Image: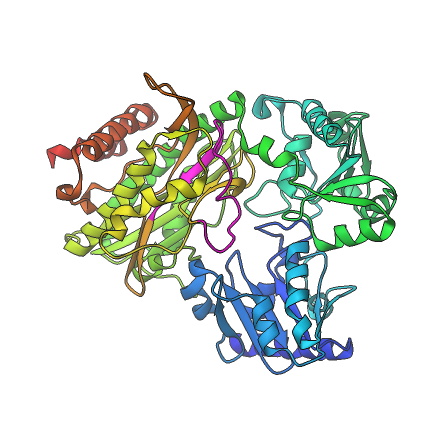
Amino acid sequence: MLMNTHEARLDALRKELKARALDGFVIPISDEHMSEYVGAYAQRLAWLTGFGGSAGTAAVLADKAAIFVDGRYTLQVREQVDGRLYEYQSVPATSVAAWLADNAAPGARIGFDPWLHGKPWADATAKALVDKQAQLVPVEGNPVDAIWADQPAPSPAPALVHDNAYTGKSSEAKRSEVAEWLAAKGLDAAVVSALDGVAWLLNLRGTDVERTPVALSFVLAHADGTAQLFIDEQKVTPQLRAHLGNAVTILPRADFVPQLQALAGKKVAVDPERSVQAVFGVLTEAGASVVEATDPTVLAKAVKNPVEQAGQRAAQHRDGAAIAKFLHWLSVEAPKGGETELSAAARLHAFRQESDLLRDLSFDTISAAGPHAASPHYRVDEESNLTISPNSIYLVDSGGQYLDGTTDITRTVWVGPGEPSAEHRDRFTRVLKGHIALALTVFPKGTVGSQLDTLARYALWQAGVDYAHGTGHGVGSFLSVHEGPQRIAKATGGQAGTGQELLPGMILSNEPGYYKAGEYGIRIENLVLVEPRTIAGAEGEYFGFENLTWAPIDRTLVDTSLLTRDELRWWDDYHAQVEAILAPQLQGEVLAWLRQACQPLSRG
């Protein structure tokens, strides 16, 4: 049985900890690069507990254990993780550090892998254990790896060159900008640990992590414009060497620590949000002067240049056609009662694969029928797979990794042949009102994401309801579908990015939602681009959002009596543009369906 398997793994881990004289251990979803999505070799939490989400941590003591997730995974963790083995803990209401402080024995030695945790976490957790006279102990070699007999090896796939036709800027130019940043701060070098930072800086991509086109590697960028790339030799091709040129030295990944040690006496920038504790430890022990600073690639990567913006528009137009084909297919097949979450996800993938520029999905498709839609980050598998029932809500959140852009779109649809309830329409329309409010907003230079978040929630709050996730995240350019530093969310719980100024060229999602546990969920998501706005008589600079995502929104779920004249105008204008952009790519029954779906809402 599945639970017996995880019980045996937990027991094996406890025996391994005892052999190492450890009283506990912390297991995050992470890798050596602080990645959100990690390779199969780094899926330690899933292997140990059965939890399949993309964010979570477990803490194991000799007599008890707990698993920590945020509001996105409240339902999922209970479906996948045995409550007899792990207490369910919700963050930010609590934390691993607080739980350990309450539950660890006096004098306990709590192990952690310094290659999987950031310095802020390690510092805060060590401080929380002081009153218990307990100690946070960095381990040599992860104890989970010691008991994971069939642990996959890291991907050996070659790193790929990403052409300047897509990047809009050469690696040399990017390295020069980083060198100028270092020189201005009087620094000698910067550690670039985040995989998307390495990929952006060197204009390389890879297939080492599912859904995110990156190659496992580190970079040391120097103030003279040179760089060192640390990557397994089997991943280096002649094309990559020619692309990088003489200014980038390619070294084995195993040389990363010795080269950090060689920076003794140097001033080195390290990002505490994107570099693991081990990097800080090695540099400090070697005698380098460590300066905590945001990775210089982060903001530069977030502000898309004109070539990247054009690529994103093209990718979105292409993706919208695939979505339209899927929504038409769904309207025909789902009411028959023979389709499932998995079959729908597979059909959507097939429509996207009609493009020769598609390289992957941008994340595992959230194909959620009925009650599963109430879990914002639900991920379907063979065990959870539900039939998409007639007369119910179906939610699909999906995206593609195209060479010229990364897409992310959510549509919630009513599956007939019956009619949705008044509650369904009310909640959907309030989510729609929040989406429109954010789409139409104009804001002054200096505005941060948390200042806009209320716009998306206002209509829901008036009905006494809310949603437990952020409203918008940054999106990469054929890179991570979740990209910082910008974010639209409540400024609570220390969430990164909510204080980042929104700048022209940044791409964000606009995705308010509503979730009724055990029944249904609603989310409407488009991507938007921050752009300058010209306002007659304006005092100072103002910005707004250019819409990037083009696909019909389900009119069946709209209560038009709740919409203002401006909201109705937005709907009609948006769908007129959807038809104009997608119609040339479609034909036959799909085209006829699109034209009907894009009729002005005022016509019923």
Q: Quadrant of residue 288?
A: top right
Instruction: Tell me where the magenta segment starts and ends, as one range.
Output: 491-512
Q: Quadrant of residue 263?
A: top right
Residue at the limit of the structure toward the bottom, as seen here: 63
Across the whole image, how many numbered discs are drawn on residues? 0
Q: Tell me which residue sits at (62%, 42%) in the image.
A: 207
Q: Position of residue 370 (x, y in %)?
A: 29, 59
Q: Is residue 212 visible?
A: yes
Q: Position of residue 411 (x, y in %)?
A: 32, 44
Residue at the limit of the structure toward the top, as seen here: 536
Left or right: residue 123 versus residue 515 is right
Q: Is residue 1 visible?
A: no
Picture layout, residue 344 above or below residue 144:
above
Q: Position of residue 221 (x, y in %)?
A: 75, 34
Q: Tell me which residue sits at (61%, 78%) in the image.
A: 8
* Residue 505 on the magenta span: yes
- State how the image is colored: rainbow
- Magenta-colored segment: predominant secondary structure: loop
Picture layout, residue 524 above or below residue 99:
above
The quarter in which the C terminus is drawn is top left
* Residue 167 on the magenta span: no
Q: Tell me which residue sits at (32%, 64%) in the image.
A: 517
Picture layout, residue 199 above or below residue 15:
above
Q: Position of residue 267 (x, y in %)?
A: 80, 39
Q: Quadrant of residue 24?
A: bottom right
